[in-house]
Amino acid sequence: MNYQIAVLAGDGIGPEITDGAIRVLQKIGEIYHHTFEFTHYLMGGCAIDETGCPLPEETVKGCLASDSVLLGAVGGPKWDSLPGDKRPEKGLLGIRKALGLYSNIRPAKLWSSLAHASPLKYELVKDGVEIIIVRELIGGIYFGERGLDEIDGEKSAWDTERYSVHEIERIARIACELAMKRSKIVTSVDKANVLESSRLWRKTVHEYAAKHFPEIEVRDVLVDNMAMQIVKNPAQFDVVVTSNIFGDILSDEAAQVTGSIGMLASSSLGDTTLGLYEPIHGSAPDIAGKDLANPIATILAAGMMLRDSFGLTKEYEAIEKAIQSVLDEGYRTADIYSEGMKKIGGKEMAERIAAAI
Ligand code: NAD
């Protein structure tokens, strides 16, 4: 098969890590007889420098015409003083909107060979952890009605959380589809003991799952309890579905459990198979151009693209196995290095993973 992939390398370490992921995809192509065609487009600071705009029209058109999109990272101190709508990060919101992406899938995976990197007790994580947080991305309080006014001469501000049945059902579908390929258990996180929007969330997730995915078991956890359980016993969770604001906070907490930001990928999907795949970390300007960046998060993101957009599960598993074997051999980039291991640069890490496929 022939797949068209739009690459938005972005700024800082973006070009290094996307190069690493491309190298691995090329190796997958050779072995499994697929052709991946990569077209680079500008987004973020590099796009501002060249065109004056963080998300040029040509980039949106190119992404829409592709089978999927691989993103590095955007931003950096050079563009920090620009006004809000001219900032590189504006490109991120813009591309998600333009591609109609309403879900964000963040697997927080702790590889058993990196269990010592977790801030949690070794016994809690020694067998590895994988929590997949499915976050609603374009609704809820971040996009709700808001305002700032004065009551009796005192400043007052408000934001509103609103979810419709349709918005909840479509994110529940994504979580259920994922869970069907895994444990068949979906943990739905809300604050239904207090919030009206959470009560509708809970009712809708249960009704939707019962109707469309009768094999799925839905478990409810209140968000405050979830925050505790993630650090108490993270291995109990598999697929977790939640609202925009709760997902924002919990996915960062779950990421910390893994202890290494350079190992975590994420994807954003909508109604079609065209998705946006990226590492969760930023453009790391402090290490850009020094061959210190860990490419594994971006390589995993490329692997998720194969599985979730192209249906190439075997190829995804080959990438995961290759990463595992390189880690088992003791190779580490600086961010995940510990004594007794073999320290290598980001480029060599990508080469070794490609060679291990
Ligand atoms: P960051 O994630 O870029 O870096 C945080 C720390 O983690 C740094 O010390 C960095 O060196 C390290 N790090 C990150 N990725 C790494 C990797 N692959 N290998 C090794 N070490 C790695 O976060 P930040 O410093 O807060 O932000 C830097 C810039 O990135 C800012 O302009 C910010 O707005 C932007 N940003 C972009 C995205 C995105 O493009 N999706 C996400 C977050 C931040």
Image: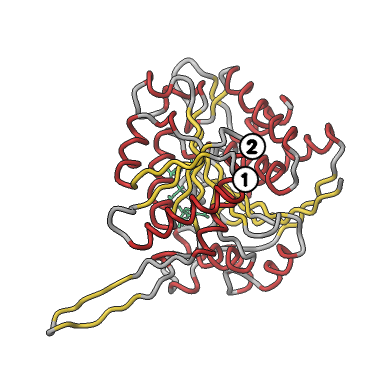
Query: Which residue appears at 81% of the width and 50% of the height?
Result: 3
Q: Which residue is mark 1?
A: 177
Vertical placement of 261 versus 245: above or below?
above
Q: Residue furthest left?
A: 152
Q: CA distance from mark 2 to mark 1?
A: 7 Å
Q: Position of residue 272 (x, y in %)?
A: 70, 58
Residue 181 located left or right of residue 220: right
Q: Position of residue 235 (x, y in %)?
A: 44, 28
Question: Label 1 near label 2: C-beta < 8 Å?
Answer: yes
Quadrant assignment for the N terminus: top right
Query: By what rule are the colours in the image chosen?
Result: secondary structure
Quadrant assignment for the C terminus: top right
Secondary structure, mark 1, is helix
Label 2 CA crowd tier, 10 Å (few <14, some 14–19, many 20+)? few
Q: Position of residue 129 (x, y in %)?
A: 48, 29
Residue 86 located left or right of residue 325: left
Question: Splitting the image into 4 quarters, where does residue 16 fall?
Answer: top right
Q: At label 1, which amino acid type do we have? A: Glu
Residue 300 located left or right of residue 172: right
Secondary structure, mark 2, is loop
Ligand 1 within 8 Å of disc 1? The answer is: no
Query: Which residue appears at 60% of the width and 57% of the height?
Result: 10
Q: Which residue is mark 2?
A: 181
Q: Position of residue 228 (x, y in %)?
A: 30, 38
